[in-house]
Amino acid sequence: MAEEKKPNKTWIWILAVVLIIGSGIGSYFLLNQEKQGKYTGPVEKITVAAFEGGASAPIYIAESQGFFENNGLDVTIKGYGSGKACADALIAGEADISTSSDAVLVGNSFDNPDLEILGTVAIIKANGLIARKDRGINSPKDLVGKKVGVTIKSTGEFNLDAMLLFNGLNI
């Protein structure tokens, strides 16, 4: 019968010591950080056009927890039913910041080159293509010659274009 190889105890002890020392150093720095006090400078008023869905939850949570106020921001949140509607409000000057998808802003950037993307609040993969098999649509190529409904300058349009391009189609 083959002899079972036992792990080298020296390596286990070295790993344990490194973990203990690392935890101690990390705890020291964590506990000795300066606590950030409430902001005392001038208050900046901004309006945020926010999607009324889960993707904008961080915005609503930040407001309810007082994070904006604690950092010198007087934020008014205007809710909208889609990221495109948020972008439209931003472009119309009804908001200073918008929670729109990158695809929506890129689609609008050709007519509004001053649009900028500051960051990402959430990443959501919730797009799909719905088609009727009873109309003979079983694959993307079956869309050729058919009418397709999509919101212009939206994530849906971007994803539809990408799907068509991927499948070598131009409907």
Image (cartoon, rainbow, N blue to C red):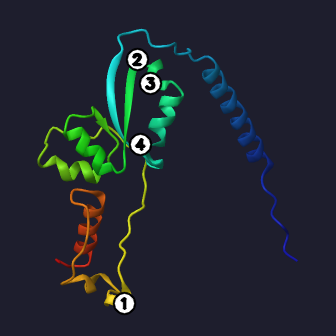
Residue 8 lies left or right of residue 28; in this view the side is right
Closest to the observer, 22 or 109: 109
Which amino acid type is shown beneath numbered disc 3?
Phe
Mark 2 residue crowding within 10 angstroms, few (<14) / some (14–19) / many (20+): some
Q: Earlier in the sequence, mark 3 or mark 1?
A: 3
Name the image quarter holding the N terminus. Answer: bottom right
Q: Nearer the viewer, mark 3 or mark 4?
A: 3
Mark 3 residue crowding within 10 angstroms, few (<14) / some (14–19) / many (20+): some
**Residue wearing tag 3:** 68
Which amino acid type is shown beneath numbered disc 2?
Gly
Residue 116 shows in this picture: no
Which amino acid type is shown beneath numbered disc 4?
Val
**Residue wearing tag 2:** 72
Distance in Å between CA atoms under marks 2 and 4: 20 Å
The residue at 33%/18% (across/down) is 44
Distance in Å between CA atoms under marks 2 and 3: 6 Å
**Residue wearing tag 4:** 121
Distance in Å between CA atoms under marks 3 and 1: 52 Å
Distance in Å between CA atoms under marks 2 and 1: 57 Å
Q: Earlier in the sequence, mark 2 or mark 1?
A: 2
Instruction: Point out residue 60 in the picture as x, y percentages from the top left corner.
Output: 47, 36
Q: Nearer the viewer, mark 3 or mark 1?
A: 1
Q: Earlier in the sequence, mark 1 or mark 4?
A: 4
SS for callout 1 = helix
Answer with the quarter of the image where residue 32 lies.
top right
Residue 8 shows in this picture: yes
Q: Do callouts 1 and 4 mark residues in contact (Cβ within 8 Å)?
A: no
